[in-house]
Amino acid sequence: MVVCSANLPYDSEDPLPSKEFEELVRYCENENLYLVIGCDSSAHHTAWGSTNCKDRGKALVEFLNYSNLEILNQGNEPTFCSGSRLQVIDITLGSFGLLESITSWVVSSEPSLSDHRHILFTLQGSVPEHLIRNPRGTNWGSSMEGLRDRLTRGPEMNVRDEAGLRLAIHWVQQALISASKDNCPLGHVKTGTQSLKWTLELESPRRGVRLLFNKCRKDKNLHSWELYRQAQRRYRKEV
């Protein structure tokens, strides 16, 4: 599976989609890879909830019709908010085979640090267990003993010629690797609690930005949007 983000600049002289975008889609199709794209399309089309259709949006829809990608957007909640501009231009695309695995698509009400709002969805499926070896958990006494034992049981090698030297280097490398693996067990990746503390410290400014954003959508005046932008900048500095 390939998961990526894509930006299709509105001022690009190239027609939609971009060359890199199209190459990625074709590559995944040829390699039978599932693809999920979070895309800032800078394009309008009612297919993903925009209020109108424009040439850029029509060109992108035409390309999607000949691919195995599906538009996952639901509803018409604005994804881009700047002043009086409220529009849906951010698209989530997914391979046809993932339609039943991607659920709960929603535009988040949480404040972002840009004019684009967060988009959330759930990708269901199994995740491979990630195990690592932490050198701090190594039993160094046992490791040194095992290394010494392996080195003493090595074959006779003449390190004065090239072939013998290569054999000796390989034997020492394998002895080091084996001693390390035997005495440094695999373990789960531990996650800290720093992110929780960070969230609690930013709760007040985050809530303030969210309230101002909701007020802007109701008032629809430039003064409210300016207050929102100021609060957003302060929140960005805190982050």
Image (cartoon, rainbow, N blue to C red):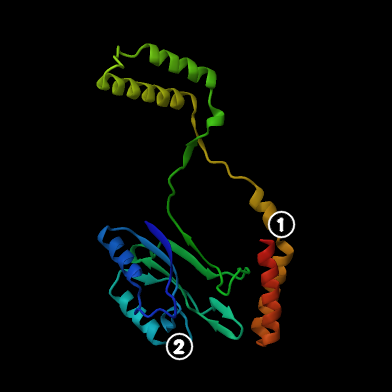
**SS class, disc 2:** loop
Residue 44 in the image: above or below residue 7: below
Q: Which mark is residue 52?
A: 2
- Image position, residue 8 (x, y; %): 42, 74
In the displayed structure image, the side of residue 233 where residue 105 appears, left or right: left
Residue 15 in the image: above or below residue 129: below
| Residue located 32% across and 69% down the image | 22
Q: On the rendered image, what quadrant is the N terminus found in?
A: bottom left
In the displayed structure image, the side of residue 235 where residue 128 appears, left or right: left
Q: Which mark is residue 200?
A: 1
| Residue located 32% across and 66% down the image | 25
Residue 22 in the image: above or below residue 185: below
Q: Which mark is residue 139?
A: none
In the displayed structure image, the side of residue 37 where residue 62 appears, left or right: left
Q: Tell me if mark 2 has few (under 14), some (14-19) or many (20+) residues whose alpha carbon lies within 10 angstroms of its own.
A: few
In the displayed structure image, the side of residue 67 where residue 84 appears, left or right: right
